[in-house]
Amino acid sequence: MDSQGWVRGVGSGLLLLLVSACSGAKPPAGPPPTNVTVAVPLQRDVVDWDEYVGRFEAVQDVELRPRVSGTIDRVLFTDGQNVGQGQALFTIDPRPYRAALGQAQAAAAKAAASLANARSEQARAQKLLEVQAISKEEFETKQAAVRTSAADLAAAQASVSNALLNLGFTTVRSPISGRVSDRRVSSGNFATEGQTVLTRVVSTNPIWFSFEGAESFYLKYLRQDRTGERGSSRNTANPVQIQLADESGYRWHGRMDFLDNAIDQNSGTIRAHAVIANPDGFLTPGMFGRARLLGSGTYKAMLVPDEAITTDQTRKLVYVVGKDGKATARPVETGPQVEGLRVVKKGLAATDRVVIEGLTTLQPGAIVKANLIKMQPRAANTAPTSQPDTAPPPSEATAR
């Protein structure tokens, strides 16, 4: 063998040895599995609550004006006190009205005497007519005199009744039970019938909570009524829960009482109010409040923590760990909070293992080491987050 052949043989052998060595090498080890905490979602039957803002209004609100004119004689109440229906609040000088009553009674007595005399003359004329001592025309004149006197007496008696009413109106009474405002006139001032405002009385129990709802919610309720999911508030006393400005929970409970017959073309909203029992008068007309109105029928939902939910450009996602140990991003439709957890309406099954911790570096398809724990409720329902007036109000939900 020449030298060149020997070199070629040695080179080929070395190349075969090198290839053989490389083919037997192990691939480099991949990154270790990501440690995550997973839990199976809680299952609940829930209902949604739609949120509104509004104010309390009196069911009855009366500006008290006198029904007769006169000088205010006495004020019979303390400003701001509770009053009952029919309670006397003011007296107007009654003397002119007592005099008018006396005149009316005298006129009625005179008319009664005239009627008695006319009837006597008619009786005498009847006897004379029977013996043809007077003509029929003369008798009919006596009959007409009786009818005229009877009408005069009726008019006089009506005047007496009117005078009695006017005398009674000199005592100004509250037409409703409730709380009276301050006096707008004091003793000695002249009050004009039907014009002078004496005070204002508002009822306190029950009380209305008035608010306006967006057309979109109104349409939702109409469709729910058609499908039987939720009755319309026009004919169903749907429950309402209310919290005051300084409260964190919804402690006041009422029911829907009114839904207007048209949507305001300028605001695109419809007026409504709920009625709430207020036996101790704590709720006051004009108070601000936030109300939750039953917004759905009962439905089944999955509950997960808010931190288990991530987002991409257009979707909300949760990571679910499969049997193969891989994390998969699952699109979900979320709802309000229940028991401190977020409602997931669509996208999760009751047996899914949802990643609730370790999401920071997790990528779809990653191999994970899952630590399974039990999902726990976190808190009772809390007040919904307030929204700007320009946005539709959010929904809230409670478990059933």
Image (tube, rainbow, N blue to C red):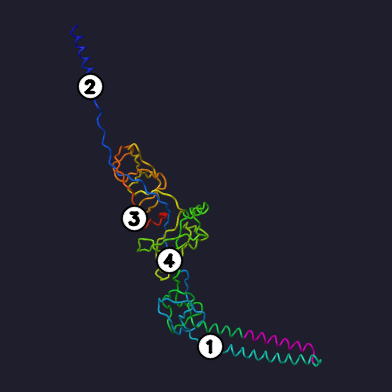
Which residue does the numbered mark 3 point to in the structure image? 379
- Marks 1 and 3: which is nearer the front? 3
Q: Which residues are magenta?
A: 134-156
Q: Earlier in the sequence, mark 1 or mark 3?
A: 1
Task: Kindly identify which numbered label has been placed on residue 56.
Answer: 4
Decide whether residue 144 is among the magenta residues. yes
Q: Secondary structure at mark 2?
A: helix
Q: Earlier in the sequence, mark 1 or mark 4?
A: 4
Q: Earlier in the sequence, mark 4 or mark 3?
A: 4
Q: Earlier in the sequence, mark 2 or mark 4?
A: 2
Residue 140 in percent (x, y) is at 76, 87
Q: Amino acid at mark 3?
A: Ala
Q: Amino acid at mark 1?
A: Arg
Q: Secondary structure at mark 1?
A: helix
The residue carrying pointer 4 sits among few (fewer than 14), some (14 to 19) or many (20 or more) residues within 10 Å by Cα, namely: many
Which residue does the numbered mark 2 point to in the structure image? 21
Which residue does the numbered mark 1 point to in the structure image? 98
Question: The C terminus is located in which quarter?
Answer: bottom left
Q: What's the residue at 35%, 56% (across, down)?
A: 380
Residue 311 in percent (x, y) is at 35, 44
Dots 2, 4 in contact, CB < 8 A? no
Quadrant in the picture for residue 80: bottom left
Q: Amino acid at mark 4?
A: Phe
